[in-house]
Image (cartoon, rainbow, N blue to C red):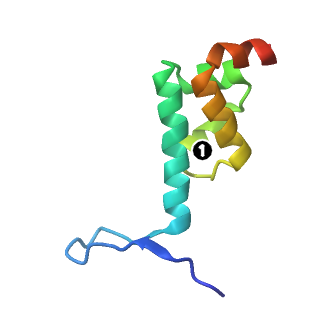
Amino acid sequence: MKKERITLPSDPSDPEDFDVTAGAMDRAQRARLIRTTRTRLGLSQAEFARRFRVPAGTLRDWEQARETAPDFALAYVKVIGQHPDLVEKTIG
């Protein structure tokens, strides 16, 4: 079984710190992009989910990095961030 590469090793002087894997780092960066896009638009999770037809539970899992948002979702969020009204009009 292949172990995932450690991207950010734990601080040996901090007993509560832990290693961060490359997968966890990627998941966190994706979560941040989604969360910052939503907050920049001034929308709650429920409002964003409803407006852009993303299941609220899925959005919550992506933002909390419980699940890794797939590439297509990141692309969709980036387009929403650039053109929210156009996206809403297109899917409405």
Residue that extends furthest to the right in the rendered view of this protein = 91
User: x, y percentage for residue 3?
Assistant: 57, 82
Q: Nearer the viewer, residue 89 or 53?
A: 89
Residue that extends furthest to the left in the rendered view of this protein = 13
State which quarter of the image contains the N terminus: bottom right
Question: Mark 1 packing: few (<14 Cα in 10 Å), some, or many (20+)?
Answer: many
User: x, y percentage for residue 55?
Assistant: 72, 32
Number of numbered markers: 1
Q: Is residue 17 left or right of residue 31?
A: left
Residue that extends furthest to the bottom in the rendered view of this protein = 1
Residue 72 visible in the snapshot: yes
Q: Amino acid at mark 1?
A: Trp
Height in image: 49 above or below 7? above
Height in image: 92 above or below 17? above
User: x, y percentage for residue 56?
Assistant: 66, 31
State which quarter of the image contains the C terminus: top right
Q: Nearer the viewer, residue 5 or 75?
A: 75
Residue 58 visible in the snapshot: no
Height in image: 81 above or below 6? above
User: x, y percentage for residue 70?
Assistant: 70, 49
Tell me which corner region of the image, top left, top right, bottom left or bottom right, holds residue 73. Answer: top right
Provide the residue designation for mark 1: 62
Q: Residue at x 55, y 47 (%)?
A: 30
Q: Residue at x 52, y 40 (%)?
A: 33
| Label 1 SS | helix
Q: Residue at x 65, y 13 (%)?
A: 85
Q: Residue at x 49, y 52 (%)?
A: 28
Q: Nearer the viewer, residue 60 or 20?
A: 20
Q: Is residue 16 left or right of residue 58?
A: left
